[in-house]
Image (spheres, rainbow, N blue to C red):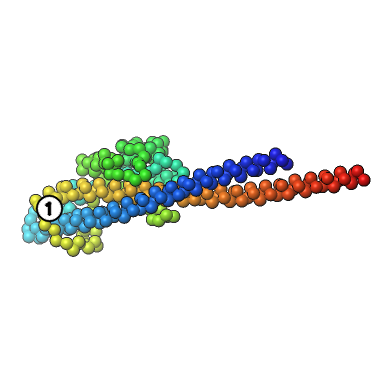
Amino acid sequence: MSASLIEIQKRIDSTRKTSQITSAMQMVSASKLTRSEAIIKQYEKYAKRIKDMVLHLAYSNLDQLAEEANNGEEQDDNQSGATYLDYHDMLLVRPVLKTAYLIIASDQGLAGGYNSSIFSSMLELFQKDHDSADGIFLMCIGDSAKRFFEKAGYSIDCSIPGISDYPTFDEVRDLVRKSVTLYRQGEFDELYVCYNHHVNALVSNFRVEKMLPLVDVDEMDNRKTPRANVDYLFEPSKEAILEQLLPQYAESLIYGSIVDAKTAEHAARMTAMRNATDNAKSLISDLTTELNQSRQAQITQEITEIVGGAAALE
């Protein structure tokens, strides 16, 4: 019985130390989450402003080209108004022969099902949308994603290892710019970024977000998105500005997704560590109850033995 009491006490001590570690890790992740959410807010301001500029330019050029067509300018009779967007290759919608996916995962553990939810969702997407791997161009952020999809039989065209807790554009510059360049060179016809989108500290949703081509043609035709109520002065020209602005816009969208994914990772790790701490405390409570019951049983047995021995001496 004494050996059992010692064993239970050791388990309680060990579990208490584990709970202290997970509690500390929860606080660290909470601090990282707060800082990462602040970065996201700053990025959203920039993203909204540059999006307004891009849509303004795209709308104005679309209207100008449509007006020229109505005035008798040459155009392809087989093309709809939407294809006026072909004045820039990053806005051109072309037949999809190969689709690129940029998968953002974590190389660090202790984040619950953060990675597994991404990987399982991607496999479902591939099976649903592609008959074979030939139509897939795969890019990965994180060695864990690279290893998983290579093991699953997919070819990884480019990747970078895990990024820091607060990713900067310099960290992902090469991959982001390479993805834009490969699209413009025709290596693939669409680009989707796949990651866990941060909703709040408790919730994240798997998201597959289309990044290239940049403008939704149907949205442009239907004018569902309001124009920015701003007049811009263009120097030297709209075309020259678009040539500089559109790649920067695409890169900023991809970078924003990376920051968003990292925020979701911090939230997932904070939640996982909180659950681990709660489970440890629950286990400590159960073990303490078991320890007390064992002690009570031991004391009762000892009293019984003493009473029995005293009675035998009478």
Along the viewing direction, whichever of 309 and 290 lies nearer the viewer = 309
The residue that mark 1 highlights is 238
Q: Is residue 149 above or below residue 75?
A: above
Which quarter of the figure is the N terminus placed in? top right
Position of residue 174 in the picture relative to residue 301 (left or right): left
Per the image, label 1 sits on a secondary structure element best described as: helix
Residue at point 9%, 52% (across, down): 235
Residue at point 30%, 40% (across, down): 171
The image shows residue 30 at horizontal and vertical percentages of: 42, 51
Q: Is residue 113 above or below residue 229?
A: above
Which quarter of the figure is the C terminus placed in? top right
The image shows residue 192 at horizontal and vertical percentages of: 30, 47
Position of residue 145 in the picture relative to residue 291 (left or right): left
Position of residue 232 in the picture relative to residue 48 (left or right): left
Tell me if residue 98 can be seen. Answer: no
The image shows residue 174 at horizontal and vertical percentages of: 26, 39
Residue 179 picture quarter: top left
The type of residue carrying mark 1 is: Lys
